Image (cartoon, rainbow, N blue to C red):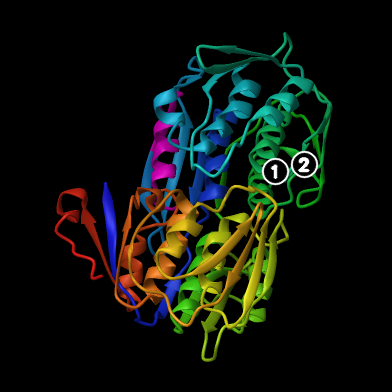
Amino acid sequence: MDAFVIEGGKPISGRFEVHGSKNAALPMLAAALLTDESLELSDVPRLEDIANMLRLLGELGVEVNEQPGKSRGGRTVQTQVTDTSLSHARYDIVRTMRAGVCVLGPMLARRGEARISMPGGCAIGPRPIDLHLKGLAALGASISLANGDVVAKAPEGGLRGATVFLGGPFGSTVLGTANIMSAATLARGRTVIESAACEPEVVDLGRLLQTMGAKISGLGTPRIVVDGVEQLGGARRRVMPDRIEAGTYAMAAAITKGELTIANWPVDALIGPFEMLRDAGVEIELSEHDPLDTTGGDSIRSTAFVRRTGSLRPVELTTQPFPGFPTDLQAQALALLTLASGNSIITEKIFPERFLHVAELLRMGAHVIRHGPTAVVSGVPKLVGAPVMASDLRASAGLVLAGLAARGRTVVRRVYHLDRGYQRMDEYLTGLGADIQRISEKTLEEVAVPA
């Protein structure tokens, strides 16, 4: 188990290129189970969650080949199904990432049966998959539990189209929409998904499925219509930029009073965070297009110039489904606002318990009071370095940002969470001027944090 040792107070500056989106790539890789032909995805990030998904596909009879990508740090992944008799997604792999549930819909639709362990992931509150199962049952699947696994079986003749409502107590389900949409591509007849997730990662998956031959309309809206086809073919697609990584690095520049050029900036996917940062006093300028983009002018890709020269202003923000402010940037935004001149209010509408980072920020001198799903952040003049413990992926990023801005040394433990969603963050931040080192558990006791 590794930790980061950060000597704070150094501005982040230079150029950073956003990698492909983890949250888009995972269900897109799972779509390999829908076809017997080759699937090729470029800009696939090198992350622990991606590695686990590729391992899972290998156990489900998918041959995986990797090649270096044209973009910095990316790669191209080719998949080819070689064995359709396998249908058990084991606990040992699925427990490491919630997105492992993405194989449920494609496997059920193509192979008629799927057995998958209940998914794991971050400790940010309960995230049941009941809406996934409800949607698949509406398509005719029988659902049962056996030894901790969900067992889904398609009826004789295959899945059939239906109207599926995916609204939940905290909004639409992104992975649930991905699962039902993928399964519906091979169902008989028309499927209408009401209260579908509008997130750009769902749109990216839908466009891949369309390239494979699926008939889908309504992508990016709460009503997706899928007309089933008999079979899907192969396809090539570039994974969209990771909007959460882009937002995190923009906030790293802002919290350290730095200046950063961010290439492959996902314009249409970051409207909410873009406005929040500007309201907080962060300057962001966008180019008309990304000069490195060779895909023919994809409108989602641009270059952002991020800098902060003055004081941070307090803001009020509420996490919401897209196009609102994403819950995956809440911890980073909260860390940033601990240094604002005034009181900020953050309300978490997606995962009300997603405030485990607050207690750790208090150790660094932050002033945060939580009232249920709302946190009141009173800005302080400075943060001070301290030993802190990461509880989940995005909380880890928030603590790293706080450490970059704090005076003195910060030790962030359990950064294996970060490796699930950020590609070599310590190395990239070092290249941008940060003083950050990754150390092993064995040497952690030798690191002294000044009182």
Q: Residue at x 46, y 73 (%)?
A: 252
Nearer-the-camera pick, 69 or 418: 418
Residue furthest toward the bottom? 310
Residue 5, image x and y in percent?
A: 27, 64
**Left or right, residue 200 beside residue 443:** right
Q: Position of residue 66 (x, y in %)?
A: 37, 45
Looking at the picture, how far across and down is residue 205, in whole percent? 64, 45
Q: Position of residue 2 (x, y in %)?
A: 26, 51
* Residue 52 on the magenta span: yes
Q: Which residue is mark 2?
A: 216
Mark 1, other Cα within 10 Å: few <14 / some 14–19 / many ≥20:
some
> Does the CB distance between marks 1 and 2 fall below 8 Å?
yes
Tell me the amino acid under the disc marked 2: Ile
Residue most extreme to the top: 156
Instruction: Give the magenta part as a residue range.
Output: 44-64
State the image quarter where residue 213 is shown: top right
Residue 96 belongs to the span the image colors magenta: no
**Eyeballing the image, is 190 above or below 426?**
above
Q: Between residue 5 and residue 73, name the one nearer to us.
A: 5
Q: Which residue is mark 1?
A: 210
The reply to whether residue 335 is visible in this rendering is: yes
Which residue appears at 56% of the width and 79% of the height? 340
**In the picture shown, does residue 43 fall above or below 255?**
above
Question: Can the viewer see residue 240?
Answer: no
